[in-house]
Image (cartoon, helix red, strand yellow):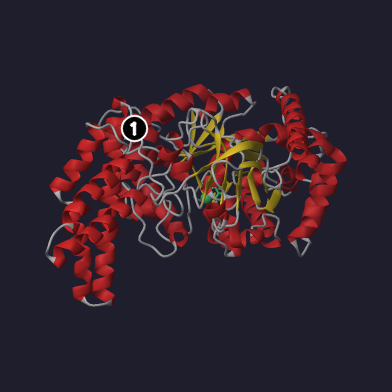
Amino acid sequence: MAETERTIQAIAVSPGVAIGRILRVDRSGRDVEIRRIAEAEVPDELARLKVAIDLTRRQLTRLRDDVRDKLRSADAEIFDAHLLLLEDKMLLGDVEKRISRDLLCAKSALHGSADHFAKVFEGMADEYLRERAVDLRDVVVRIADNLTPEKAVQANNTGDRRIIIANTLTPSETVRLDKKRVLGFAVVTGSATSHTAILARSMQIPAIVGIPAELLETLGATDRIIVDGYSGKLIINPDDRTEEAYQTKIRSTGKLIEELAGERDLLPVTRDGFEVELAVNLESAEQYEDACKAGAHGVGLFRTEFLFMDRLHIPDEEEQFQIYKKLLIAAGDAPVTIRTMDVGGDKFNDTIYQSVENNPFLGLRGIRLALYERRDLFDIQIRALLRAGVYGNLRVMLPMVSSIREILYSKRIIAELQQKLEAEGKEHVKRLTLGIMVETPAAAMMADNIADLVDFFSIGTNDLVQYTMAIDRGNERVAYLYQPSHPAILRLIRNVVEAARARNIYVCVCGQMASEAIFAPLLLGLGVAELSLAPSALAAVRRVIRSISLHEAETAAEKALRCSHSGETIDIFHELLTRRAPEIAGFLD
Ligand code: PEP
Ligand code: MG
């Protein structure tokens, strides 16, 4: 008998509808299937194993030191024993052999070796040695945990594309998802502005977050689901009528998307003749070609940390130089705004920096990490940018700035690197266009002082909302407080715009707020003339801009600045959108 249909309301984070069967991605390695790999995959699999072992070593060392500080040193010895296992040549040699000779994936190989050696221990007469079997299994599960789940996606050999159900997907796992195998995802943790959600949007994978954790236990591979990335609904075992209704929705949305795509060459000009700059946010340089097809004018934010995250080695100066140069040449005269690496928060590459912080979003992130922990990487990146800058219209911006000192220090480093490049006779940009992300309340409040030091501001509303509202942007439990139209945010944006105007520098908004059709008129009305969007949002935002006048946007924004709740502002702009672009407003209902 068919299961009855059930609907669960979660949080929509990436538009689109996915209908299909489930692929449960379990990072704990408990559902280990024996998976064979192709010979060509062996080096990759060995590298992945090495990363997981290095990470495990760091975790165990930290655990041991913590236990030693807080408990007794005798307790810490357990972890010393675990650390020794990580150096055990016989064990690791056996795992590697299973990968390279037997062509098993790292997880299968690990469990195979663990079973083999644990049995040897378990057969021993000495009780102490028998207990080593427990240690062995413990360490192996830990290493397996540190293998990333995207391989589970690749392990799906069923031939059909599936919808991932998981507790969490990290940004570095998301960026590696293979769209040929993944229809969408529904996860427990996260929010609309978590980097996982940002990537899902830019990869155009329908996604929802905030599903109940119990579903991970109860849903199975035979269940069919619908992930509605517009409304946030998860429908389990939909009946024929529901599925048909969704197929109709997919068709009508597709029609509108096609119609909007036909407007790619139309200028983003308001009815009263005000032209808005519409640039795009990129997570990889390769996305630019598609963004251009969608009518983008330049790049407003290139999140370069993703250059470091989806690979095992860190790109050196030459490799980065080539990437930036190619992008700048492709963009011609259009500005290309490249943000220096914003590692930290929820974006980690364990090779660069492994967070040991309780609150990574409030820790060593962005410019802080670059200046005080990984100066070597910052210098390499700045050199690559300075050299590439001669090939186009480069703007460089610094993430997570919260003090003037960080800007002055960065400028000093840039000047020193320019001198070095000069001495080496290498062609480079002599006058770098430098700006900052305004994404901390401190930077927004200090905008007038900062405006004297930089060429532009780019408002990062994802973080500005996070830090102003004191909510972790990745925490689904406080996602209801993620309110870009909160009066506090509007006042901060206004403050930044006024400071920029007074010093005659330009200001852009590149946070998710700029990609939301309802907020485009609000930002225009607040005085922002440049928006940088997820490429998938370009068409709808362009249609909205062309449907309204700057004058009405300004009047509505003035009204919004006097509101005391974000809901009132939403009402004002929802009314404007419904009146001027009802087809786009329909998406929001
Ligand atoms: C932001 O904070 O708004 C932003 C654009 O940067 P990121 O989302 O990468 O933190
Ligand atoms: Mg940010």
Q: Amino acid at mark 1?
A: Arg
What residue is shown at x 19% (from left), y 45% (from top)? 92
Q: Which of 269 and 313 lies nearest the eye of the viewer?
A: 313
345 and 319: which is toward the camera: 345
Lateral position of residue 286 relative to residue 10, left or right:
left
- Say which residue appears at 38% left-offset and 63% top-offset: 357
- The image shows residue 66, relative to residue 56, as above or below, that is below
Dot 1 surroundings within 10 Å: few (below 14), some, or many (20 or more)?
some
The residue that mark 1 highlights is 36
- Check the image and report above or below for 97 versus 146: above
Q: How far across and down, in percent of the image, does residue 281 sit?
A: 56, 37
Look at the picture and state if 292 lies above or below 434. Answer: above
Residue at image point 40% right, 32% down? 429
Residue 210 at x, y percent in the picture = 60, 55
Q: Judge whether 546 appears above or below 343 on screen.
A: above
Q: Is residue 149 visible?
A: yes
